[in-house]
Image: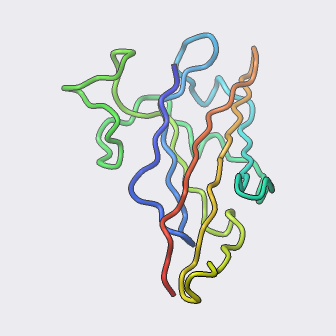
Amino acid sequence: MTIGILTGTVHAGSGVCLMARLRGLDGNLVTQASLSSITYAIRDLTDAVTDSTGSLTISSVIFDSLQQNDLRWRKDSQSRPGPDGQHGYNFRTVMGATLFGEFTVATASPYRVSPSTFQIDVKFTPTSGQAFVQSWQITPLPTYV
């Protein structure tokens, strides 16, 4: 079971923090040593275009123990553990605003920046066994410029 969340409100033209408690297909929490690579693809679902692809540095985004004192993680807690009996996350990264491509100006108002809906697919490849993907979808709030 993998539990992923977005933190806070996402605004058009801003980066987004992704967090998750990741378990591999074997059911164990992932660790830095259990993974060989992490890649991502960001797709604009509105026009079916892949805006960005790349890789993440395992040691920068994977924690070998669950992070349980970060106020951004609100999915579960010690007093309200998740369905797996755990709380906290072992994956966190920030996807920068530039990875989401350009936003278009809506026709209703020349000042409203109208974002698309994006899907962020992060592929985790373990040192043994099959790769798995965690996905997030975001529709940033419009930004007025």
Image quadrant of residue 47? Answer: bottom right
| Colour scheme | rainbow
Q: Nearer the viewer, residue 122 or 66?
A: 122
Q: Is residue 77 left or right of residue 121?
A: left
Along the viewing direction, whichever of 36 and 14 lies nearer the viewer: 14
Give me the residue at 65% from left, 23% from top: 34
Residue 59 screen position, x and y as percent? 60, 41
| Residue 38: % across, % down | 71, 38
Q: How many marks?
A: 0
Q: Is residue 53 above or below residue 114?
A: above
Q: Residue at x 61, y 19 (%)?
A: 24
**Residue 77 at x, y percent in the picture:** 26, 31
**Residue projecting furthest to the front:** 108
Q: Residue furthest left?
A: 79
Can you say whether 31 is above or below 114 in the image?
A: above
In front of the other: 141 or 130: 141
Q: Position of residue 74 (x, y in %)?
A: 31, 41
Is 136 on the left or on the right of 71, as rendered?
right
Residue 121 image-quadrant placement: top right
Outermost residue, top direction?
26
The answer to whether residue 84 is above or below residue 14 is: above
Residue at 37%, 32% (x, y): give it.
88
